[in-house]
Structure formats: structure tokens, C-alpha cells
Amino acid sequence: MAFSSRILTSWRDGWRRVAAAPAVAAGVFALTLLLALPLAMVLRGALTSQLGSSLVAGRVADGVDYDWWQEFSAQATGLGTTFSPSILGFAATLDNVSGVLDGRAEPAPVAWALALYLAGWMFLSGGIVDRYARQRPTRTHGFFAACGVYGFRFLRLAIVAGLFYWWLFAFVHPWLFDTQYVNLTRGLGVERIAFLWRVAFYSAFGALLVLANLVFDYTKVRIVVEDRRSVVGALVAAVRFIRRRPRQALGLYALNSLVFVALLALWALVAPGARGAGFSMWAGLVVAQLYILARLLLKLQFMASQTALFQANLAHAAYTAAPVPVWPESAAAETIAR
């Protein structure tokens, strides 16, 4: 049961590290909000130009007008095509999961915003992992210095990860769902069997995504904690770490995933649906933002707990190879200090 104890210890330690750095959570939430606002404003403009000051606008403000919604969807282009019933409440979450598993392409504006968001995460991840590994404040200059140091290394890792995920969605996904699934379900008279085959292929493809995500996560941890400059070397080291401790690495990932599932279940219960203008609308907005914040905190918990597990296995809980970047770093600083 030693591995279970280490998993729980790392999981609790991860939450402690996240709680000790509230500025990190505030920063990633601000990044999410800032990138979502331009899309919201563009969509607002499209809705305003379509509704104007008509009587339909009043009906839409009071609740859902499906006749108008179908009319808008039929003529919508670009970002407007995302304004569908699937954006309401928990349906939006299910639609996002379905989009990933089905390899569905996003409209160009959403794809660009997603690319910027991933670039922002890539830049900040080095500073975030560095902060969690050190377990002490690094201040603004130290945090962004770490972001700059590891940003170029994470960029090279992102290229490798992007090529691997492209291979999964360009070749493995079509082979599973367009070839194997079609061959296995051709001529079947029982819909339940076809559904079970699809679930099996979803599970297999999801397992590949999880394994890839796990390897790339620990690659980032090894790059930061050990100050590795070689991305290939860090990738090999991450695979070696997972292969030698599969129960710990997969167990911690499963524990964090269970928390995520619990969060989804709670969100399914409280997710707001279509609401009219007024207090109920603003209450629904607040609930939705709290859910987004909880998801971001859980993402940070993944990073913090994986860092804690890696450091615990090194038998050196506070180990970080690179020194904290301090300005000025010249030898004259000591003379000035005297």
C-alpha cells in the first residue's frame, strides 16, 4: 500500500501548493476571460444586428425563441455557427467532449482563440511548474523569468506534441472510426452492438490521449525540476519515470480524473439552462464562471500534484535544479548590497 500512500500524499500536497499560490490561479482565469471576451463581443454584435429593436428581441430576452434561433442558425457564418442549443448548460460540456473524440474542427475564430490560449498556457506553464516545485514565492520577476527560460523549451515540446496529436487525429482516429468501426458494424441488425463497438473505440482512443497527456505532463515537470535543455531527453526520461512507477503515475492521474468527473456531475446538476433577463441570467453567469474557475483549479492541481509525485520519488521534496532568477544577477550586486 506504499504506492497508495504516496499517491494520496502527492494529491494533498498538490492542493496545498495550488492554495499557496492564489495569484497563479487568478492569472490563468484572467487569461481565459481575456481571450473569451473578444469572441463574446463579436457574437454579441452578430446577434444585435440580426435582432435590432424588433419585437422578437423582447421574446428572446425573456426566454428561448426556437423559431428565431433556427432562422439565425440557418444564415449564420463563422463564429455565429457556434450559437446553437448545444451551448446551453451541461450540453456545452458534452458537446466539447464529443468534439474532441470525434475530431471535429472548430470555426476559424474559435480555432485562432484556442491557439492563442494554448500559446498562453505554454508560456505560463514553465513559471507555474517552477513555482509549484519551489514551494515558495518567486515574485513577479522570478515567475516571468522562469516563463521565459522554459518557454522556448516548451515550444519545442509543443511541436513534438502537436505532431503526435496530429498523427492521432489524422490517421489513428479515421482508422478506428471510418475503417474498423464501419467494417465491424456493416450489416448489423442490433443497434446496441454497434453502440458498444463505438464506446470501445472511444475508450481506446481516449486511452491514447490520456497516455500522451501523461507523458507530456511529466516531460514538462522533468524539464523544469531538473533544468533539462533537451526536450527529447526529457521525453525519454518521462517515459522511463512512468514505466518504472506506472501505478503511482496512473493512480494519481486517475484520482485527479475522478475529481474532474465529480465536478462534471455537480455541474450537470446546477448548470443553468435558458434564462430570461434579470437576476436569474446574472446568477447563471456567476455559476458558469465558478465552474470554469473550478476546472482551472483542477488543471493546476494536475500540474502541482504531478510535480509533487516526481519530487517525492526523488527523495528530495524541495529539489529544483535551476536557481531562482533574481535581478540583478551580476557580481556587483553583492558589493551594492554591502
Image (tube, rainbow, N blue to C red):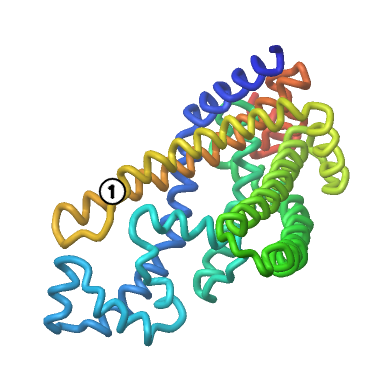
Pick the residue in front: 162 or 260. 260
The residue labelled by disc 1 is 286
Q: Position of residue 309 (x, y in %)?
A: 68, 25
Circle 1: residue type: Val
* Front position in the image: 201 or 239: 201
Q: Percent from the top left, x then y, of residue 68? A: 25, 80
Q: Is residue 167 rendered to the left or right of residue 42?
A: right
Residue placed farthest to the top in the image? Answer: 1
What residue appears at the point 41 percent right and 44 percent down from the top-left corner? 293
- Which quadrant of the figure has residue 242? top right
In the image, residue 55 lies at what x, y percent? 11, 81
Q: Is residue 161 left or right of residue 100?
A: right
Q: Is residue 286 above or below residue 107?
A: above
Extreme residue in the front direction: 189
Res. 39 image quadrant: bottom left
Residue 317, horizontal then vertical, whole percent: 69, 19
Q: Nearer the viewer, residue 142 or 124?
A: 124
Q: Is residue 197 left or right of residue 175?
A: left
